Image: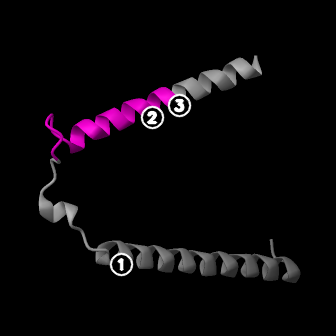
């Protein structure tokens, strides 16, 4: 039973992948094979992506610092005997 379920999930995943690829291909290219996006959209610079990566890294670092502070506060609270 377990193998049948695994094979079923594999087939469902493969079918989903094929459908998404076909939909993406239809959305990005015309019938003649030309791209639908204008040249400006295709010639992106990496500055926007670099800025997004930097902001994501800063956000994750801040979240890590705040989580460590919460852990330290909880540990101190436990050591002092507060509920």
Q: Which residue is mark 2?
A: 17
Residue at the image point whose x is 24% and y is 68% from the top: 44
Q: Position of residue 39 (x, y in %)?
A: 13, 61
- Residue situated in front as seen by the camera: 35 or 61: 35
- Residue situated in front as seen by the camera: 34 or 24: 34
Determine which of the numbered discs, if any, sits on residue 51 in the image. 1
Label 2 vs label 1: CA separation?
30 Å
Label 1 vs label 3: CA separation?
34 Å
Residue at the image point whose x is 22% and y is 44% from the top: 28
Q: Which residue is mark 3?
A: 13
- Residue situated in front as seen by the camera: 78 or 9: 9
Q: State the SS at label 2.
A: helix
The relative height of residue 79 versus residue 24 in the rendered view (above or below) is below
Mark 3 nearby-residue class (10 Å; few <14, some 14–19, many ≥20): few
Question: Quick one: quadrant of the N terminus?
Answer: top right
- In the image, residue 9 lies in the stretch drawn in magenta: no
- Is label 2 in contact with label 3 (beta carbons under 8 Å)? yes
- Is label 2 in contact with label 1 (beta carbons under 8 Å)? no
User: What residue range appears in magenta?
Assistant: 14-34
Quarter of the image for residue 21 reads top left
Residue at the image point whose x is 65% and y is 23% from the top: 7
């Amino acid at each position: 039973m377990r193998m049948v379920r695994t094979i079923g999930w594999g087939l469902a995943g493969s079918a989903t992948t094929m459908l998404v690829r076909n939909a993406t291909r239809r959305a990005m290219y015309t019938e003649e094979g030309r791209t639908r996006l204008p040249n400006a959209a295709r010639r992106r610079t990496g500055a926007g992506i670099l800025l997004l990566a930097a902001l994501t890294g800063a956000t994750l670092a801040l979240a890590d610092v705040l989580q460590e502070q919460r852990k330290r506060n909880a540990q101190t609270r436990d050591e002092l005997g507060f509920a």
